[in-house]
Image (cartoon, rainbow, N blue to C red):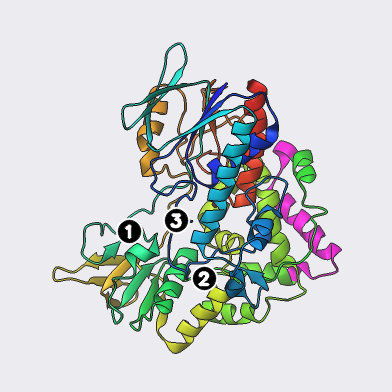
Amino acid sequence: MHIGIVGAGAAGVGLLDALAAAGAEPGTVTVFDGSPALWRGRPYQPDLEAVRVNAPPVIMSIRAGDPAHYQRWLSARTGVEQYRDDLLEQILLPRAHYGEYLTDTARAAIGALRRAGWRVSVVNARVTGFSRGETAVLHTEDGGRIPVDRAVLAVGNGRPHDHYGLTGAPGYVNEPYPLARTLTDIAPEAHVGVIGSGLTAVDIAVALSAHGHTGPISFLSRSGTLPFVQKRPARLELRHLTPEAIAAAGAGLTFDHLVDLMRAEITGLGQDFDAFAAEILATETESPTDRLRRQLTEVDSPRHGTRLLAMAIRVVGPLAWPLLPESERTRLRERHFRTINSLSSPMVPHNAKIVLRLLDSGQLRLRPGVRKIEARPNGGFTITDEREGMADVIVNAVNPPAYTTPAETAALVSALLAGGAAELRAVGGLPVDRETRAPLVQGRPDPTWHVLGNLAADSMFIATNPPGLAAEAARLARILTRAG
Protein backbone atom coordinates (compact mmCIF):
# COMPACT_ATOMS: atom_id res chain seq x y z
CA MET A 1 0.00 0.00 0.00
CA HIS A 2 1.43 3.35 -1.11
CA ILE A 3 -0.32 6.34 0.49
CA GLY A 4 0.19 9.83 -0.90
CA ILE A 5 -0.57 12.72 1.47
CA VAL A 6 -1.05 16.04 -0.30
CA GLY A 7 -0.37 18.71 2.32
CA ALA A 8 2.17 18.98 5.13
CA GLY A 9 0.24 21.19 7.53
CA ALA A 10 -1.53 20.28 10.78
CA ALA A 11 -3.86 17.80 9.04
CA GLY A 12 -0.92 16.00 7.44
CA VAL A 13 0.89 15.87 10.79
CA GLY A 14 -2.19 14.38 12.47
CA LEU A 15 -2.47 11.72 9.77
CA LEU A 16 1.20 10.75 10.00
CA ASP A 17 0.90 10.49 13.78
CA ALA A 18 -2.24 8.36 13.47
CA LEU A 19 -0.65 6.06 10.89
CA ALA A 20 2.33 5.58 13.21
CA ALA A 21 -0.04 4.59 16.03
CA ALA A 22 -2.14 2.23 13.88
CA GLY A 23 0.31 -0.68 14.05
CA ALA A 24 -0.60 -1.78 10.54
CA GLU A 25 1.34 -3.84 8.01
CA PRO A 26 4.17 -1.60 6.72
CA GLY A 27 3.76 0.17 3.40
CA THR A 28 4.91 3.40 1.76
CA VAL A 29 3.96 7.00 2.57
CA THR A 30 4.90 10.00 0.43
CA VAL A 31 4.05 13.50 1.65
CA PHE A 32 3.83 16.35 -0.89
CA ASP A 33 4.01 20.06 -0.09
CA GLY A 34 5.71 22.98 -1.81
CA SER A 35 5.91 25.15 1.31
CA PRO A 36 9.29 26.41 2.56
CA ALA A 37 8.03 25.74 6.12
CA LEU A 38 6.80 22.15 6.19
CA TRP A 39 4.41 20.90 8.90
CA ARG A 40 3.28 24.38 9.94
CA GLY A 41 0.55 25.29 7.46
CA ARG A 42 -0.53 28.90 7.09
CA PRO A 43 -1.07 29.78 10.78
CA TYR A 44 2.12 28.45 12.41
CA GLN A 45 4.96 29.77 10.25
CA PRO A 46 7.92 31.61 11.82
CA ASP A 47 6.48 34.96 12.88
CA LEU A 48 6.46 37.71 15.49
CA GLU A 49 6.51 36.75 19.17
CA ALA A 50 3.33 38.79 19.64
CA VAL A 51 1.32 36.36 17.51
CA ARG A 52 0.13 33.87 20.13
CA VAL A 53 -1.77 30.59 19.96
CA ASN A 54 -5.44 31.45 20.48
CA ALA A 55 -6.40 28.49 22.69
CA PRO A 56 -5.26 26.82 25.93
CA PRO A 57 -2.97 23.78 25.62
CA VAL A 58 -5.71 21.29 26.48
CA ILE A 59 -7.39 21.88 23.11
CA MET A 60 -4.25 22.10 20.98
CA SER A 61 -3.13 18.45 20.84
CA ILE A 62 -2.70 17.02 17.32
CA ARG A 63 -2.69 13.43 18.62
CA ALA A 64 -6.10 11.76 18.59
CA GLY A 65 -7.34 10.56 21.97
CA ASP A 66 -4.44 12.18 23.82
CA PRO A 67 -5.38 15.73 24.87
CA ALA A 68 -2.23 15.97 27.02
CA HIS A 69 0.16 15.31 24.12
CA TYR A 70 0.86 19.02 23.48
CA GLN A 71 1.00 19.75 27.21
CA ARG A 72 3.72 17.11 27.68
CA TRP A 73 5.72 18.63 24.84
CA LEU A 74 5.22 22.06 26.39
CA SER A 75 6.31 20.94 29.87
CA ALA A 76 9.62 19.68 28.46
CA ARG A 77 10.55 23.14 27.17
CA THR A 78 12.33 25.85 29.11
CA GLY A 79 11.48 29.55 29.17
CA VAL A 80 7.79 29.11 28.44
CA GLU A 81 6.54 30.80 31.64
CA GLN A 82 7.08 34.18 30.00
CA TYR A 83 4.11 33.36 27.76
CA ARG A 84 1.64 32.71 30.58
CA ASP A 85 -1.74 34.43 30.24
CA ASP A 86 -2.38 35.52 33.83
CA LEU A 87 -6.16 35.71 33.50
CA LEU A 88 -6.46 32.39 31.68
CA GLU A 89 -3.74 30.82 33.86
CA GLN A 90 -2.42 29.01 30.79
CA ILE A 91 0.77 29.18 28.74
CA LEU A 92 0.03 30.54 25.27
CA LEU A 93 3.10 30.17 23.08
CA PRO A 94 3.77 32.29 20.02
CA ARG A 95 2.33 30.46 17.04
CA ALA A 96 5.76 29.88 15.55
CA HIS A 97 6.63 27.80 18.63
CA TYR A 98 3.47 25.77 18.20
CA GLY A 99 4.74 25.16 14.66
CA GLU A 100 7.81 23.62 16.30
CA TYR A 101 5.48 21.24 18.16
CA LEU A 102 3.88 20.20 14.87
CA THR A 103 7.31 19.77 13.29
CA ASP A 104 8.57 17.65 16.18
CA THR A 105 5.42 15.52 16.06
CA ALA A 106 5.78 14.94 12.31
CA ARG A 107 9.43 13.98 12.65
CA ALA A 108 8.67 11.62 15.52
CA ALA A 109 5.88 9.98 13.52
CA ILE A 110 8.12 9.54 10.49
CA GLY A 111 10.78 8.01 12.71
CA ALA A 112 8.27 5.60 14.27
CA LEU A 113 6.92 4.57 10.87
CA ARG A 114 10.40 3.91 9.53
CA ARG A 115 11.32 1.84 12.58
CA ALA A 116 8.18 -0.20 11.96
CA GLY A 117 9.31 -0.92 8.39
CA TRP A 118 7.45 1.80 6.47
CA ARG A 119 9.15 3.67 3.64
CA VAL A 120 8.48 7.37 4.17
CA SER A 121 9.58 10.24 1.95
CA VAL A 122 8.76 13.95 1.70
CA VAL A 123 8.56 15.66 -1.69
CA ASN A 124 8.95 19.44 -1.38
CA ALA A 125 6.83 20.18 -4.44
CA ARG A 126 3.15 20.80 -5.10
CA VAL A 127 0.94 18.16 -6.66
CA THR A 128 -0.55 19.82 -9.73
CA GLY A 129 -2.15 16.93 -11.59
CA PHE A 130 -3.49 13.41 -11.43
CA SER A 131 -4.00 10.58 -13.89
CA ARG A 132 -5.00 6.94 -13.90
CA GLY A 133 -3.44 4.07 -15.77
CA GLU A 134 -2.67 0.74 -14.25
CA THR A 135 -2.47 2.72 -11.02
CA ALA A 136 -3.19 6.26 -9.86
CA VAL A 137 -0.38 8.72 -10.55
CA LEU A 138 0.27 12.09 -8.85
CA HIS A 139 1.96 14.75 -11.01
CA THR A 140 4.20 17.29 -9.28
CA GLU A 141 5.15 20.78 -10.44
CA ASP A 142 8.77 19.70 -10.97
CA GLY A 143 7.77 17.02 -13.47
CA GLY A 144 7.61 14.10 -11.06
CA ARG A 145 5.20 11.21 -11.58
CA ILE A 146 4.54 9.17 -8.43
CA PRO A 147 2.19 6.16 -8.52
CA VAL A 148 0.05 5.65 -5.39
CA ASP A 149 -2.68 3.30 -4.25
CA ARG A 150 -4.48 5.88 -2.10
CA ALA A 151 -4.17 9.65 -1.89
CA VAL A 152 -5.35 12.12 0.75
CA LEU A 153 -6.19 15.79 0.20
CA ALA A 154 -5.04 17.43 3.45
CA VAL A 155 -4.54 20.94 2.12
CA GLY A 156 -6.07 23.23 4.74
CA ASN A 157 -7.88 26.49 4.04
CA GLY A 158 -7.51 28.86 1.12
CA ARG A 159 -6.08 32.35 1.05
CA PRO A 160 -8.02 35.57 1.78
CA HIS A 161 -10.16 37.04 -0.99
CA ASP A 162 -9.62 40.60 -2.19
CA HIS A 163 -13.22 41.76 -1.70
CA TYR A 164 -12.55 45.37 -2.72
CA GLY A 165 -10.29 44.82 -5.73
CA LEU A 166 -7.23 46.41 -4.11
CA THR A 167 -4.54 43.97 -5.22
CA GLY A 168 -1.58 45.83 -6.68
CA ALA A 169 -2.36 49.11 -4.92
CA PRO A 170 0.64 50.48 -2.97
CA GLY A 171 0.03 49.89 0.74
CA TYR A 172 -2.44 47.03 0.33
CA VAL A 173 -1.69 43.68 2.03
CA ASN A 174 -3.98 40.84 0.98
CA GLU A 175 -2.25 38.00 2.88
CA PRO A 176 -1.19 39.24 6.32
CA TYR A 177 0.74 36.18 7.51
CA PRO A 178 3.49 36.03 8.47
CA LEU A 179 3.08 39.39 10.17
CA ALA A 180 6.86 39.64 10.50
CA ARG A 181 6.96 40.13 6.74
CA THR A 182 3.91 42.34 6.24
CA LEU A 183 3.74 44.68 9.25
CA THR A 184 7.27 45.53 10.30
CA ASP A 185 7.88 48.04 7.49
CA ILE A 186 4.70 50.04 8.14
CA ALA A 187 5.52 53.57 9.31
CA PRO A 188 4.78 53.93 13.05
CA GLU A 189 2.52 56.94 12.48
CA ALA A 190 0.56 55.46 9.55
CA HIS A 191 -3.20 54.99 9.74
CA VAL A 192 -3.72 51.24 9.29
CA GLY A 193 -7.12 50.04 8.12
CA VAL A 194 -7.76 46.37 8.89
CA ILE A 195 -10.52 44.68 6.91
CA GLY A 196 -12.40 42.53 9.41
CA SER A 197 -12.70 42.37 13.21
CA GLY A 198 -12.03 38.69 13.99
CA LEU A 199 -8.99 36.87 15.34
CA THR A 200 -6.73 37.85 12.44
CA ALA A 201 -7.61 41.52 12.96
CA VAL A 202 -6.85 41.10 16.67
CA ASP A 203 -3.47 39.55 15.81
CA ILE A 204 -2.65 42.54 13.60
CA ALA A 205 -3.60 45.12 16.24
CA VAL A 206 -1.66 43.30 18.95
CA ALA A 207 1.41 42.93 16.72
CA LEU A 208 1.34 46.61 15.73
CA SER A 209 1.07 47.62 19.39
CA ALA A 210 3.97 45.35 20.38
CA HIS A 211 6.17 47.03 17.77
CA GLY A 212 5.45 50.54 18.97
CA HIS A 213 2.90 51.63 16.37
CA THR A 214 1.55 55.07 17.30
CA GLY A 215 -0.81 55.79 14.42
CA PRO A 216 -4.53 55.02 14.35
CA ILE A 217 -5.81 51.52 13.64
CA SER A 218 -9.31 50.95 12.27
CA PHE A 219 -11.19 47.66 12.12
CA LEU A 220 -13.28 47.93 8.95
CA SER A 221 -16.19 45.50 8.79
CA ARG A 222 -19.90 45.16 8.20
CA SER A 223 -20.84 44.35 11.81
CA GLY A 224 -17.92 45.39 14.03
CA THR A 225 -18.38 42.16 16.01
CA LEU A 226 -15.32 41.21 18.06
CA PRO A 227 -14.54 37.63 19.08
CA PHE A 228 -15.73 36.45 22.48
CA VAL A 229 -13.10 36.35 25.23
CA GLN A 230 -11.86 32.88 26.15
CA LYS A 231 -12.89 31.75 29.63
CA ARG A 232 -10.59 29.90 31.99
CA PRO A 233 -10.88 26.16 31.33
CA ALA A 234 -13.09 24.14 33.66
CA ARG A 235 -13.64 20.40 34.01
CA LEU A 236 -16.90 19.83 32.15
CA GLU A 237 -18.48 16.86 30.46
CA LEU A 238 -21.26 16.84 27.88
CA ARG A 239 -24.06 14.63 29.18
CA HIS A 240 -26.92 15.40 26.80
CA LEU A 241 -25.44 17.03 23.69
CA THR A 242 -23.27 14.01 22.96
CA PRO A 243 -22.12 12.12 19.85
CA GLU A 244 -24.48 9.32 20.89
CA ALA A 245 -27.45 11.70 20.99
CA ILE A 246 -26.54 13.05 17.55
CA ALA A 247 -26.24 9.53 16.13
CA ALA A 248 -29.60 8.57 17.64
CA ALA A 249 -31.31 11.55 16.00
CA GLY A 250 -29.76 10.70 12.63
CA ALA A 251 -31.35 12.28 9.59
CA GLY A 252 -34.13 13.67 11.79
CA LEU A 253 -31.77 16.06 13.56
CA THR A 254 -32.83 19.72 13.59
CA PHE A 255 -31.40 22.91 15.05
CA ASP A 256 -34.29 23.00 17.57
CA HIS A 257 -33.22 19.53 18.71
CA LEU A 258 -29.67 20.81 19.30
CA VAL A 259 -31.05 23.77 21.28
CA ASP A 260 -33.10 21.42 23.47
CA LEU A 261 -30.01 19.30 24.18
CA MET A 262 -28.02 22.43 25.04
CA ARG A 263 -30.82 23.57 27.34
CA ALA A 264 -30.62 20.21 29.13
CA GLU A 265 -26.85 20.63 29.53
CA ILE A 266 -27.13 24.05 31.16
CA THR A 267 -30.17 23.39 33.33
CA GLY A 268 -28.54 20.13 34.43
CA LEU A 269 -25.80 22.27 35.99
CA GLY A 270 -28.44 24.34 37.80
CA GLN A 271 -27.79 27.37 35.59
CA ASP A 272 -30.09 29.70 33.65
CA PHE A 273 -30.42 28.74 30.00
CA ASP A 274 -32.50 31.81 29.10
CA ALA A 275 -29.81 34.19 30.41
CA PHE A 276 -27.19 32.29 28.40
CA ALA A 277 -29.36 32.41 25.25
CA ALA A 278 -29.97 36.14 25.68
CA GLU A 279 -26.22 36.80 25.82
CA ILE A 280 -25.63 34.82 22.64
CA LEU A 281 -28.48 36.56 20.79
CA ALA A 282 -27.11 39.98 21.81
CA THR A 283 -23.72 39.33 20.18
CA GLU A 284 -24.38 41.56 17.17
CA THR A 285 -26.40 44.26 18.98
CA GLU A 286 -24.48 44.88 22.21
CA SER A 287 -21.69 47.45 22.06
CA PRO A 288 -18.52 45.47 21.16
CA THR A 289 -16.40 47.51 23.58
CA ASP A 290 -18.88 47.05 26.44
CA ARG A 291 -19.07 43.32 25.75
CA LEU A 292 -15.28 43.04 25.63
CA ARG A 293 -14.93 44.91 28.93
CA ARG A 294 -17.59 42.75 30.60
CA GLN A 295 -16.19 39.47 29.32
CA LEU A 296 -12.72 40.31 30.61
CA THR A 297 -14.23 40.45 34.11
CA GLU A 298 -15.91 37.07 33.56
CA VAL A 299 -12.91 34.96 32.54
CA ASP A 300 -13.24 32.86 35.70
CA SER A 301 -17.06 33.02 35.82
CA PRO A 302 -18.82 29.93 37.23
CA ARG A 303 -21.47 30.27 34.51
CA HIS A 304 -20.54 27.56 32.02
CA GLY A 305 -22.83 28.25 29.05
CA THR A 306 -20.20 29.53 26.60
CA ARG A 307 -17.68 26.94 27.79
CA LEU A 308 -20.18 24.16 27.10
CA LEU A 309 -21.13 25.61 23.74
CA ALA A 310 -17.50 25.91 22.63
CA MET A 311 -16.96 22.28 23.71
CA ALA A 312 -20.07 21.15 21.84
CA ILE A 313 -18.98 22.92 18.66
CA ARG A 314 -15.65 21.07 18.81
CA VAL A 315 -16.96 17.66 19.88
CA VAL A 316 -20.35 17.21 18.21
CA GLY A 317 -20.43 20.02 15.67
CA PRO A 318 -18.68 18.01 12.92
CA LEU A 319 -21.07 15.10 13.52
CA ALA A 320 -24.23 17.21 13.66
CA TRP A 321 -23.52 19.55 10.76
CA PRO A 322 -24.00 17.11 7.83
CA LEU A 323 -27.23 15.78 9.40
CA LEU A 324 -28.98 19.15 9.63
CA PRO A 325 -31.42 20.08 6.84
CA GLU A 326 -29.78 22.15 4.11
CA SER A 327 -32.12 25.07 4.86
CA GLU A 328 -30.88 25.20 8.46
CA ARG A 329 -27.23 24.92 7.45
CA THR A 330 -27.73 27.82 5.03
CA ARG A 331 -29.38 29.93 7.73
CA LEU A 332 -26.61 29.28 10.24
CA ARG A 333 -23.88 29.90 7.68
CA GLU A 334 -25.36 33.06 6.17
CA ARG A 335 -27.17 34.73 9.07
CA HIS A 336 -25.25 33.67 12.15
CA PHE A 337 -21.69 33.22 10.91
CA ARG A 338 -20.25 36.07 12.98
CA THR A 339 -21.84 34.87 16.21
CA ILE A 340 -20.83 31.23 15.72
CA ASN A 341 -17.31 32.17 14.65
CA SER A 342 -16.95 34.55 17.61
CA LEU A 343 -17.98 31.78 20.00
CA SER A 344 -15.96 28.99 18.44
CA SER A 345 -12.80 31.07 17.99
CA PRO A 346 -12.58 33.35 21.04
CA MET A 347 -9.60 35.58 21.69
CA VAL A 348 -7.42 34.88 24.68
CA PRO A 349 -7.50 37.38 27.57
CA HIS A 350 -3.88 38.45 26.91
CA ASN A 351 -4.94 39.81 23.52
CA ALA A 352 -8.32 41.03 24.74
CA LYS A 353 -6.65 43.30 27.31
CA ILE A 354 -4.47 44.85 24.61
CA VAL A 355 -7.45 45.40 22.30
CA LEU A 356 -9.45 47.03 25.11
CA ARG A 357 -6.53 49.30 25.98
CA LEU A 358 -6.24 50.37 22.34
CA LEU A 359 -10.00 51.00 22.16
CA ASP A 360 -10.05 53.00 25.39
CA SER A 361 -7.12 55.13 24.25
CA GLY A 362 -8.82 55.87 20.95
CA GLN A 363 -5.93 54.45 18.92
CA LEU A 364 -8.13 51.54 17.77
CA ARG A 365 -11.50 52.34 16.24
CA LEU A 366 -14.30 50.02 15.17
CA ARG A 367 -15.92 51.10 11.91
CA PRO A 368 -18.91 48.88 11.11
CA GLY A 369 -21.08 49.27 8.04
CA VAL A 370 -18.19 49.65 5.59
CA ARG A 371 -19.52 49.68 2.03
CA LYS A 372 -16.51 50.56 -0.08
CA ILE A 373 -12.71 50.84 0.09
CA GLU A 374 -10.89 52.45 -2.85
CA ALA A 375 -7.23 53.11 -3.64
CA ARG A 376 -6.50 56.80 -4.19
CA PRO A 377 -4.49 57.83 -7.29
CA ASN A 378 -1.78 59.52 -5.21
CA GLY A 379 -1.54 56.88 -2.51
CA GLY A 380 -3.62 55.86 0.45
CA PHE A 381 -7.21 54.64 0.53
CA THR A 382 -10.70 56.08 0.87
CA ILE A 383 -13.03 54.22 3.24
CA THR A 384 -16.78 54.71 2.89
CA ASP A 385 -19.31 53.77 5.57
CA GLU A 386 -21.76 56.35 6.93
CA ARG A 387 -19.03 58.87 6.20
CA GLU A 388 -15.74 58.96 4.30
CA GLY A 389 -12.31 58.52 5.81
CA MET A 390 -8.71 57.87 4.86
CA ALA A 391 -6.12 55.21 5.60
CA ASP A 392 -2.48 54.95 4.57
CA VAL A 393 -2.32 51.13 4.64
CA ILE A 394 -5.00 48.48 4.26
CA VAL A 395 -4.47 44.94 5.60
CA ASN A 396 -6.94 42.20 4.72
CA ALA A 397 -7.90 40.21 7.83
CA VAL A 398 -10.99 38.47 6.41
CA ASN A 399 -10.50 34.74 6.28
CA PRO A 400 -11.52 32.95 3.08
CA PRO A 401 -15.06 31.57 2.86
CA ALA A 402 -15.65 27.99 3.89
CA TYR A 403 -14.58 25.28 1.43
CA THR A 404 -12.27 27.62 -0.49
CA THR A 405 -9.69 25.70 -2.48
CA PRO A 406 -6.17 26.94 -1.65
CA ALA A 407 -4.52 28.57 -4.66
CA GLU A 408 -1.63 26.10 -4.40
CA THR A 409 -4.10 23.21 -4.81
CA ALA A 410 -6.32 24.68 -7.52
CA ALA A 411 -4.57 22.89 -10.40
CA LEU A 412 -4.89 19.52 -8.66
CA VAL A 413 -8.56 20.02 -7.79
CA SER A 414 -9.21 21.04 -11.40
CA ALA A 415 -7.52 17.82 -12.53
CA LEU A 416 -9.68 15.78 -10.14
CA LEU A 417 -12.84 17.42 -11.43
CA ALA A 418 -11.80 16.97 -15.07
CA GLY A 419 -10.78 13.36 -14.47
CA GLY A 420 -14.02 12.38 -12.81
CA ALA A 421 -12.43 11.80 -9.41
CA ALA A 422 -14.46 14.49 -7.60
CA GLU A 423 -17.37 16.88 -7.94
CA LEU A 424 -17.82 20.41 -6.63
CA ARG A 425 -20.93 21.49 -4.78
CA ALA A 426 -22.58 24.74 -5.80
CA VAL A 427 -21.90 26.25 -2.35
CA GLY A 428 -18.32 24.97 -2.41
CA GLY A 429 -16.47 21.94 -1.17
CA LEU A 430 -16.14 18.39 -2.44
CA PRO A 431 -19.00 16.00 -1.58
CA VAL A 432 -17.57 13.01 0.28
CA ASP A 433 -18.74 9.64 1.52
CA ARG A 434 -19.50 10.03 5.21
CA GLU A 435 -17.81 6.78 6.22
CA THR A 436 -14.71 6.66 3.99
CA ARG A 437 -14.21 10.41 3.27
CA ALA A 438 -13.79 9.51 -0.40
CA PRO A 439 -14.99 12.13 -2.93
CA LEU A 440 -18.37 11.28 -4.41
CA VAL A 441 -18.96 11.31 -8.16
CA GLN A 442 -22.61 10.82 -9.07
CA GLY A 443 -23.08 9.33 -5.63
CA ARG A 444 -20.25 6.80 -5.94
CA PRO A 445 -16.97 7.06 -3.93
CA ASP A 446 -13.73 7.48 -5.83
CA PRO A 447 -11.41 4.45 -5.35
CA THR A 448 -8.23 6.51 -4.84
CA TRP A 449 -8.89 9.78 -3.05
CA HIS A 450 -9.90 10.81 0.47
CA VAL A 451 -10.47 14.30 1.88
CA LEU A 452 -9.22 15.40 5.31
CA GLY A 453 -10.32 18.76 6.69
CA ASN A 454 -12.43 21.69 5.57
CA LEU A 455 -12.35 21.06 1.83
CA ALA A 456 -15.01 18.37 2.40
CA ALA A 457 -18.46 19.77 1.66
CA ASP A 458 -19.96 18.23 4.80
CA SER A 459 -17.44 19.90 7.11
CA MET A 460 -18.51 22.86 9.22
CA PHE A 461 -18.02 26.38 7.87
CA ILE A 462 -15.49 27.21 10.58
CA ALA A 463 -11.90 25.99 10.58
CA THR A 464 -11.40 22.63 12.25
CA ASN A 465 -9.22 22.90 15.38
CA PRO A 466 -6.25 20.58 16.06
CA PRO A 467 -8.17 17.97 18.12
CA GLY A 468 -10.87 17.87 15.45
CA LEU A 469 -8.29 17.33 12.74
CA ALA A 470 -6.61 14.67 14.87
CA ALA A 471 -9.89 12.78 15.33
CA GLU A 472 -10.59 12.93 11.59
CA ALA A 473 -7.04 11.79 10.84
CA ALA A 474 -7.32 8.82 13.20
CA ARG A 475 -10.54 7.64 11.52
CA LEU A 476 -8.96 8.01 8.10
CA ALA A 477 -5.80 6.16 9.19
CA ARG A 478 -7.95 3.20 10.19
CA ILE A 479 -9.69 3.27 6.79
CA LEU A 480 -6.40 3.46 4.89
CA THR A 481 -4.69 0.69 6.84
CA ARG A 482 -7.73 -1.59 6.57
CA ALA A 483 -7.67 -1.03 2.81
CA GLY A 484 -4.06 -2.19 2.74
Label 2: how many residues lie within 10 Å, few (<14), some (14-19) or many (20+)?
many
Using the numbered discs, state the Cα–Cα distance from disc 1 to disc 2 in whole angstroms: 20 Å
Using the numbered discs, state the Cα–Cα distance from disc 3 to disc 2 in whole angstroms: 25 Å
Q: Is residue 328 above or below residue 450?
A: below
- The answer to which of 180 and 344 lies nearer the viewer is 180
Q: Taking the image as drawn, is residue 170 in sight?
A: yes
Q: Is residue 332 above or below residue 213?
A: above
Q: Give the extent of the magenta segment.
A: 250-274
Residue placed furthest toward the bottom: 361
Rendered location of residue 127, percent (x, y): 39, 32
Rendered location of residue 166, percent (x, y): 25, 59
Q: Is residue 117 left or right of residue 429?
A: right
Q: Which residue is mark 2?
A: 226
Q: Nearer the viewer, mark 1 or mark 3?
A: 3
Q: Taking the image as drawn, is residue 461 in sight?
A: no
Q: Earlier in the sequence, mark 1 or mark 3?
A: 3
Q: Quadrant of the C terminus?
A: top right
Let me know if residue 6 is in the magenta part: no
Q: Amino acid at mark 1?
A: Asn
- The local secondary structure at tag 1 comes to loop
Q: Are marks 1 and 3 in contact (CB under 8 Å)?
A: no
Q: Is residue 88 left or right of residue 458?
A: right
Q: Which image quadrant for residue 376?
A: bottom left
Q: Which residue is mark 3?
A: 45
Residue at 63% x, 69% y: name it: 91
